[in-house]
Amino acid sequence: MMNVDAVILGLIPGTVVGIIGFFLVKTLKDIEGKINRNEVATGNNEKKLESVEEKLTEKIDNVGKELSEHKELVQRDFITKQEHARTYGEISKKLDKIQDYLMQLVKERR
């Protein structure tokens, strides 16, 4: 019986080491598979990011062009504060002249 006990005692550590080794190899293969899938996904994400960057750059350029067009329209179609004040002053002077002329006509009729 001693020989059987010695054999069993010798097999137990070997079996335990074998089981641990099996699970370590399986775990390492799973991790390696996940790493490979992540590398593929990362490559796809980089392509997607480049595509998004190109689209955003194009949109930013379009917005810049539209802004330039609107700036030109504003400069062409609207007046500045100084131009408004100058024009208002000119109109006010002309109205004053008209008022003076009308007042002179009223005085002459009396």
Image (tube, rainbow, N blue to C red):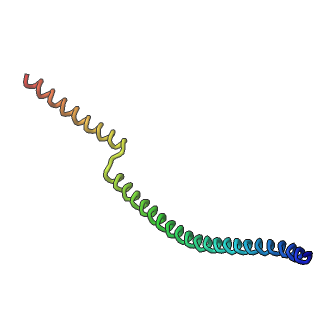
Quadrant occupied by the C terminus: top left
Q: Is residue 53 left or right of residue 84?
A: right
Percent position (x, y) of residue 60? 46, 61
Q: In this view, does 18 lie above or below 107?
A: below
Q: Which residue lies furthest to the right in this view?
A: 2
Report the residue at 53% width, 67% height from top.
Answer: 49
Residue 106 position in % (x across, y down): 11, 26
Going by the image, does 104 lie left or right of 34? left
Q: Residue furthest left?
A: 109
Q: In this view, does 73 lie above or below 42?
A: above
- The residue lying toward the viewer, choosing from 90 and 19, is 19
Give the number of callouts. 0
Q: Quadrant of residue 104?
A: top left
63 to the left or right of 101: right
The picture quadrant where one finds residue 27 is bottom right
Q: Position of residue 28 (x, y in %)?
A: 71, 72
Residue found farthest to the top: 110
In this view of the protein, which residue sits in the foreground, 83 or 68?
A: 68
Quadrant hosting residue 14: bottom right
In this view, 81 is above or below 68: above
Left or right of residue 11: residue 70: left
Q: Position of residue 96 (x, y in %)?
A: 23, 32
| Quarter the N terminus occupies | bottom right
Residue found at x 57% / y 70%: 46
| Identity of the residue drawn at 46% across and 67% down | 55
In the foreground, 74 or 13: 13
Q: Residue at x 92, y 75 (%)?
A: 2
